[in-house]
Each structure stands twice: as structure tokens, then as C-alpha cells.
Amino acid sequence: MTSTLALSAATPGAAFEKVTIQRRDLRPDDVQIEVKYAGICHSDIHQVNEDWGPAIFPMVPGHEITGVVSAVGSEVTTFAVGDRVGVGCYVDSCGTCEICLRGDEQMCLNGPVATYNGREYDGTPTAGGYSKSIVIKDHFVMSVPDGMDLAAASPLLCAGMTVYAPLVRFGAAAGKNIAIIGLGGLGHVAVKIAHAMGATVTLLSHSPRKEQDALAFGADHYVVTSDPENLRALNGTFDFVLNTVSADIELDAYLETLKIDGAFINVGFPAKPYQFHAGSIVMHQRAIVGSNFGGPAATQEMLNFCAEHNIAAEIELVDAGEIAAAYERVANSTVRYRAVIDIAGTLLDN
């Protein structure tokens, strides 16, 4: 075991404290990473506060991790010391079930291992990227392409993959007319990626405040949905709608904006169950679907795509001692557009 410095919450809702945690000794297929940056995901806040049910404490969050390889196990051939790498939401899976074998390790039938607030298969609690060092199975480590800024790349390991997967699955491309709901941490990356794929992109938002940003990121149109008439004017327009927000919405109104055979894709977690009329989907063969991240191979594909098209998250760097304030701003949607902790520069021993 090796010791490393980390930011840990001892109990639900507790303030983060600088503590020393233990990382396992390198296994033959392990990679040790010196963490440079860790993005703050809204799910970090939910899990630290136990909003989604009982969690494992003490907790070291962080599943948007970028850094540099500091050591490799004896059987690792893909990475070498000094390589720029990233880690996302999962750090292990069974590797043998049909879902793992098709490349969707994040939905492993035997239970994927979350980067934090999870348990290794031997029962050891996992601790995430709010730490100076982390040890990860090589299969779940991604290469960060040269030229991509490590800080701006870190949110791509969660937010980027969360939106890239459904955009690929539902065929965002030239000739497709799509809508994205919300211009937050997920939505702004979705706009950039969908634009790079060639789709015609409409950003749907309840407020006009972010219109200029949306257009700068690549949106072709911006529609303010607080006026129901604006949304009604879009009926039958979109091949699919990607919902990146967790707010309660009038689902029927958005379903009506879909073409025949269109899909409403959800990646958010609203507090209340959706309600809609069956006729909104039956009469025009529309679908309501979810999308759950992606496996390591797809995540590497996403990073390569973003590097090729010069796509990165819009970020604000956060000091390791200012997480409480950053969490409040993330919860209030005032970060533009993703908060990233400068682990290497501000999580110090003194």
C-alpha cells in the first residue's frame, strides 16, 4: 500500500478535509497516475449529500480525472511513465459478460465498479480523483491526445462521454436536425460535439441569457422555451432531442417537437417522474430512451474525436481549498461551464 493526499468528506454533507488515504500496490495490469486535475461533476454533489440513497463514507469523489502516468504494472504494455492519461466513471468490470464483451463495461451484468462510492470486487471501497495519486486497472485508463489541455479535458471523461454516446448512437450527422435541452456542463459540450458531427443544432433553454454562448459553441438556432408558443412552433422538427438537464419539464411539449420515429433521449436525473400522454409517442412512433455513458473504447474514441475537432470543455479552475464554494456555484448553475480542481497545483502537503 502507498499513501497519498486526498480531499475527503467524512459523513454525508460534511466539509472536505485534507487526509491521507491508502492506494493499493500495483498489480500486474495496474497504472499509477499522478493526478493533475479533477473535474467537479454535479453527481459528486449528489453523492456526497446522499441525495441518491445510502453512500460509502468517508468519501473521496472525482470521476473526471486527468494526469500523468507515474508507474505501471509488469504486464502493462499500453502505457508508460510520463504518458498523459484520463480516467472516467468506472474502474473495473467483470470483463466476461455479454455486455462487457460488446464494449459496454459501464453496464456490466455483474456490476461495474464505480471510480468512487463503489466497491472493488474484493469489497474495498473505491476513492476517486480528488487525490494526488490513483491506481487504476489499465483497461479503464484512457490516453489524452497530445495538444489537448489536461484541465479542459478532464470534464470530457464524464460530461463529454455522457453526451457523445447518444449523439453517436442516434446518428448525429449532416442532414440531421437535432435539439439539445440546456446549456450547462453537459449541454455546452453536446453542442460542440454535435456541431462537429455536422448536425443542425438547436439549443432549447428556458432563458435567453446564454444565447450568444450557444451560438459561439456551434448551435445554429437558440429557442427560449419559457414561451410555450416558441416550442409549439417547432412541432415535428427534430430527428431527436437530447435532454441534458435534470429539471422538471412538460414532456409532452418536447415530444411534439419530434418527427415521426423521433427519439427523446434523456441523460439527466429529474427529481420527479416524467408524466406524458401515450398519444405523444404512439401516434407518431416516437421513443423515450435513456443513455448511460460508454465503455473505455468508446471513451477513447470520444477523446480522439474531440482532439481532432479541437473540442474541450469551458472550465473554471478551482483551488482545492475552495470546494465548498465551487459546489454551491455548481448547484446554482453559475459556473461557466465546468469547475475543475487544480489538484497538482493546490492540494499541497503543508
Image: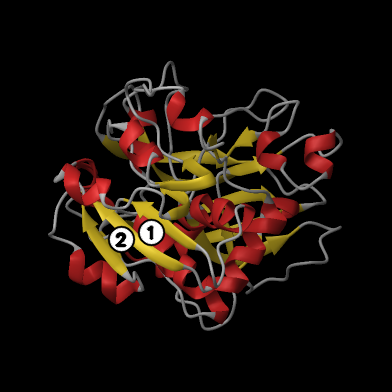
The image position of residue 8, as x and y in percent, is 37, 36
Quarter of image, res 217: bottom left
Q: Kindly identify the residue that appears in the image at 52 percent across and 36 percent down.
A: 116
Q: Amino acid at mark 2?
A: Thr
Q: Amino acid at mark 1?
A: Ile
The image position of residue 71, as x and y in percent, is 68, 62
> From this viewpoint, is residue 297 visible?
yes
Disc 2 marks which residue? 346
Compared across the picture, whether 132 is left or right of 231 comes to right
Density class for disc 2 (Cα within 10 Å; few <14, some 14-19, many ≥20) is some
Q: Quadrant of the C terminus?
A: bottom left
Residue 283 versus residue 193: which sits nearer the camera?
283
Q: Relative to 87, say whether 218 is above or below.
A: below
Q: Which mark is residue 343?
A: 1
The image position of residue 185, as x and y in percent, is 34, 54
Residue 185 versus residue 25: which sits nearer the camera?
185
Compared across the picture, whether 114 is left or right of 249 comes to right
Q: Relative to 249, say whether 188 is above or below.
A: below
Query: What colour scheme governs how the chains and residues are painted in the rendered image of this protein?
Result: secondary structure
Q: Kindly identify the residue that appears in the image at 23 percent across and 58 percent down.
A: 223
The image position of residue 315, as x and y in percent, is 31, 65
Q: Kindly identify the residue that appears in the image at 27 percent across and 26 percent down.
A: 13
Density class for disc 1 (Cα within 10 Å; few <14, some 14-19, many ≥20) is many
Q: Quadrant of the N terminus?
A: top right
Q: Are marks 2 and 1 in contact (CB under 8 Å)?
A: yes
Q: Relative to 92, say whether 111 is above or below.
A: above
Q: Kindly identify the residue that appears in the image at 66 percent across and 49 percent down.
A: 136
Outermost residue to the top: 54
Compared across the picture, whether 328 is left or right of 276 comes to left
